[in-house]
């Protein structure tokens, strides 16, 4: 029972439920790639291995982030109650969970195809390095975007064993969507990061300019989604999903103001979970019909 309690603490610590942000895009990459290459949806076991690879990768990345940032979290009033600073789990226990998660990722990649295995070190590099970037560059949000955008790219590679222009357009769409909302999320720690010598766009440019930069990133994401639809010859259902996603991003930005961050969690968690599901459902519907 103690092990199950520890596991529950770890899953809460890494916000396991937020896998919903990236998993639909991993599925979208797999479906879109296989349809373009083979004219069919991926086989059942390909879905299974892509799912396990995605869950393993995100779990490893988030747990590593909590281990690497545990001292920073301990000094930040907003994060001092997280599991490791609060002593609910040890760094060793978190490291063991990370190792198991990486094993799941590795095993799943080897069940897919050769290119998945070849690109595995690239994915692992970004899973590890992004947690350190806030120590030396305000572009840490972009690195996080790259890390999470590897999910749809990995789904595409996992299903097809190939890469294409459409795969990279999907990659850039997700990259700037993630980077934009991470900038928004980082506004709540702008002052703390500034006093501790940590880098983020809000701490470097200020909250007001950071929110403008986040808007710019989301405009790039929206345009990339449009270009993806054109490159992949998708139809009106897909574009309806893109427009709806654009409206969600506009609403998200309306919730967060430089002098009022009280609705930040709604903008960050709720709206982004909805956006990822909207893009997946509308895209899949378009490809299926």
Image (cartoon, rainbow, N blue to C red):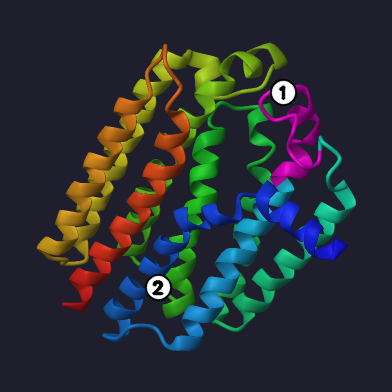
The location of residue 176, given as percent across then percent down, is 39, 42
Specify start and end residues of the magenta stretch as a single range.
65-84
Report crowding for label 2: few under 14, some 14 to 19, many 20 or more residues within 10 A (C-alpha). Answer: many
| Above or below, 197 relative to 269 | above
Q: Is residue 174 magenta?
A: no
The location of residue 37, given as percent across then percent down, is 31, 81
**Residues at marks 2 and 1 touching, judged by CB atoms closer than 8 Å:** no
Query: Quadrant of residue 264 in the image?
Result: top left
Q: Comparing marks 2 and 1, which lies closer to the viewer?
A: 1
Pick the quarter of the image with the N terminus: bottom right
Q: Badge 2 is on which residue?
A: 30
| Above or below, 98 relative to 27 | above
The location of residue 208, given as percent across then percent down, is 40, 14
Using the rendered image of the protein, determine whether residue 119 is visible from the camera's viewpoint. no
Q: Residue at x 19, y 61 (%)?
A: 238
Using the rendered image of the protein, determine whether residue 273 is visible from the camera's viewpoint. yes
Q: Is residue 82 magenta?
A: yes
Q: Residue at x 42, y 27 (%)?
A: 263
Q: Secondary structure at mark 2?
A: helix
Disc sitting over residue 132 in the figure: none
| Above or below, 219 relative to 127 | above
> In this rendering, would 215 be left or right of 132?
left
Q: Badge 1 is on which residue?
A: 76
Pick the quarter of the image with the C terminus: bottom left
Of 3 and 280, the residue lying toward us: 3
Structural distance between the alpha carbons of marks 2 and 1: 39 Å
């Amino acid at each position: 029972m103690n092990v199950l309690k520890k596991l529950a603490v770890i899953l809460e610590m890494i916000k396991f439920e937020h896998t919903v942000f990236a998993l639909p895009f991993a599925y979208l990459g797999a479906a879109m790639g296989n349809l373009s290459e083979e004219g069919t949806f991926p086989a059942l076991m390909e879905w299974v291995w892509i799912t396990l690879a995605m869950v393993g990768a995100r779990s490893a990345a988030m747990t590593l982030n909590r281990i690497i940032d545990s001292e920073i979290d301990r000094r930040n009033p907003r994060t001092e109650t997280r599991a490791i600073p609060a002593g609910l789990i040890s760094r060793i226990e978190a490291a063991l969970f990370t190792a198991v998660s990486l094993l799941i990722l590795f095993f799943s990649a080897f069940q897919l195809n050769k290119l998945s295995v070849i690109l595995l070190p690239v994915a692992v590099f970004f899973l590890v390095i992004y947690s350190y970037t806030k120590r030396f560059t305000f572009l840490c949000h972009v690195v996080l975007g790259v890390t999470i955008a590897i999910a749809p790219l990995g789904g595409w590679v996992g299903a097809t064993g190939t890469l294409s222009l459409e795969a990279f357009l999907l990659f850039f769409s997700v990259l700037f969507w993630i980077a934009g909302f991470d900038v928004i999320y980082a506004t709540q720690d702008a002052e703390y990061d500034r006093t501790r010598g940590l880098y983020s766009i809000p701490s470097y440019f200020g909250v007001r300019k950071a929110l403008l930069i986040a808007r710019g990133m989301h405009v790039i994401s929206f345009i990339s989604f449009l270009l993806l639809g054109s490159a992949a010859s998708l139809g009106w259902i897909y574009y309806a999903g893109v427009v709806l996603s654009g409206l969600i991003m506009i609403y998200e930005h309306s919730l967060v103001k430089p002098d009022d961050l009280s609705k930040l969690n709604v903008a960050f968690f709720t709206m982004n979970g909805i956006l990822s599901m909207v893009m997946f459902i509308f895209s899949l519907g378009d490809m299926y019909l």
